[in-house]
Amino acid sequence: MTESDLELARRVDWRFLLPDAKLGRVACPGSEPKDLRRSLKRFSAEFAEGHAAAGDRDLVVVADEAGKGVARAAELARPGGWVLVETSGRARRRVENVLRRQGFEGVTSRWHWPDFDRCLEIVPLDEPDAVRLALGRRRASARSRIKATGAGVLLALGQLDRAVPCVSVIGRRPGGVGPAVSFTTAVIAALGASEQELARGMSALLVTPRFPTSRHVIALVVPSGASEPALVAKIPRLAEDRGGIEREASVLRRLDEMTKGRRGGAPRVVSLDDASGWPVLVETAITGVPLNPRAIRSDPDGCITAVRRWLDELPVMPAERETFERLVIGPLGRLRRSWEALVERTLQLGAPLAGDEVPLVFEHCDLSHPNVIVQKDGTLGVIDWELAEPNGLPLCDLCFFLAYAAAARDGADSPEAQEASFVRAFVGVDAWAGRIVLDEAARRRIPSELVEPLFVATWARDAARFVERTGADGGDVTDARPLRYWRLATRHAGALGWI
């Protein structure tokens, strides 16, 4: 798996709307965008570069904003084959009517937000529950909230499609072989009876993140008449990339076992299986309001207190002699070639962790937005446990969250502003976050001489995880946030001021 593979996969995340995400024989007639052509060539069993015979293709993809060339392109689909048209909201009804006149069945339309190239969500326009869920997620800014309110009015009037620029229309030619249901419907059908009941009459909002380390799409399963998802399906973009969801399932089951099912702030694993030949992890949904930068700015002290309380509930285990080798030396090994001096300095600073005085904790390892959620009862819920370490290091989750809180509190969007926030939070006698870390260490009876090594280890391990997940080489990620924070922590070690 390479970053290039993931980039190509993201352009065709709509594969998971079809019964089979493994694209078969594909044609894309017309002047399709170059990025779409490259993605289809990568993920098709066979891609028709030029003319394809009528009735020969498993899937026909049409990029036609006005929807005028759909009828001729649709003739290429075999019986049982599918047509997907990338068009505009204004042309949606025309395209649907063309496909229905040609006898296509199961014709549905979905809104790609914000557009096809940068898509973050794929919203079924004929399923109001999923549309309302999508609009409710638009909380990042006042402008987005105003636009979501306007879209809600258009939804109530049945006019939303006229306001959205990018819509896909999908239909199936009758006959032939192969399933006629969507991939997400197949996922639900594979669940146990109680979970099927939970998702009865379900809608599915497909979330398609595009941040550099994102390797999965997320289906939020909304029961009929509900305003929030009941189940979440996590699906790797590449079928062979099973490690992330397998690790997450293992971690969550271990947490459930260690806490005897009393962890209301973490999802429960429903199933880990294949659907239509593709690996899928299904979990119960954690719902509520995200602890986003706006929430941090409105009440930074309250947010930090809530996170510390949540961390208190995680299991604590006795110290182990091999902790330093397993959790620091091992992960840094892959960074030595590109950052040898930085690795050596980190290992020197971290040497005190080689003793047997460090209690182990159940570590989440990615405790920041969008993974932290305020539930209806006011308690926190945390999602995305793919990176978690059941026998991890203490203080690291708190340091990680405080760095996020510092940037959020300061409104730091640029790399330079984020670094300045990091330094203000952790460096000097007035370092407010540093004092919180030190207080937490005292409360957990962690020797003060271990606090600085744990602080540095937080960012070194985060950098190692980032490099592993992206598959990037040293020169490609030098300016990535995990690498910048690692350099800052190492540079200021010995002069933090609060230790």
Image: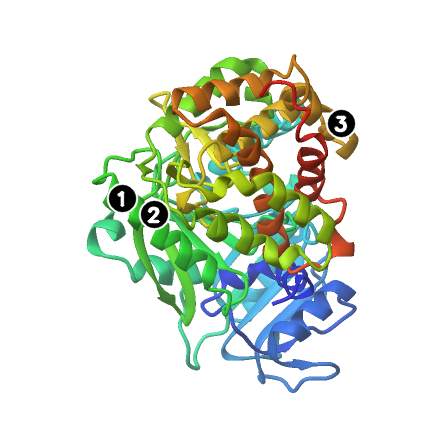
Q: Amino acid at mark 3?
A: Ala
Residue at x 71%, y 34% (from the top left corner): 488
Relative side of 357 to 209, left or right = left
Quadrant of the rendering where the N terminus is positioned: bottom right
Q: Tags 1 and 3 in contact by the CB under 8 Å rule?
A: no
Where does residue 328 sit, x and y in percent of width and height?
A: 53, 48
Q: Amino acid at mark 1?
A: Asp
Where does residue 301 sit, x and y in percent of width and height?
A: 51, 14
Nearer-N-terminus badge (2/3): 2
Residue 34, quarter of picture? bottom right
Tell me the crowding category of disc 3: few under 14, some 14 to 19, or many 20 or more residues within 10 angstroms, Cα based.
Answer: some
Where does residue 142 sit, x and y in percent of width and height?
A: 64, 22
Relative side of 325 to 111, left or right = left
Tell me the crowding category of disc 2: few under 14, some 14 to 19, or many 20 or more residues within 10 angstroms, Cα based.
Answer: many
Residue nearest the viewer, comparing 250 with 427: 427
Where does residue 451 sit, x and y in percent of width and height?
A: 52, 29
Residue at mark 2: 252
Q: Tags 2 and 1 in contact by the CB under 8 Å rule?
A: yes
Residue at mark 3: 417
Numbered tag placed on residue 256 in the rendering: 1
Q: Can residue 460 be seen in the rendering of this structure?
A: yes
Report how far apart the C-alphas of labels 1 and 3 lie in the structure: 39 Å
Report how far apart the C-alphas of labels 2 and 3 lie in the structure: 35 Å
Residue nearest the viewer, comparing 334 with 402: 334
Report how far apart the C-alphas of labels 2 and 1 lie in the structure: 6 Å
Q: Amino acid at mark 2?
A: Leu
Element marked by disc 2 = helix
Give the answer, above or below, for where 326 lies relative to 179: above
Element marked by disc 3 = helix
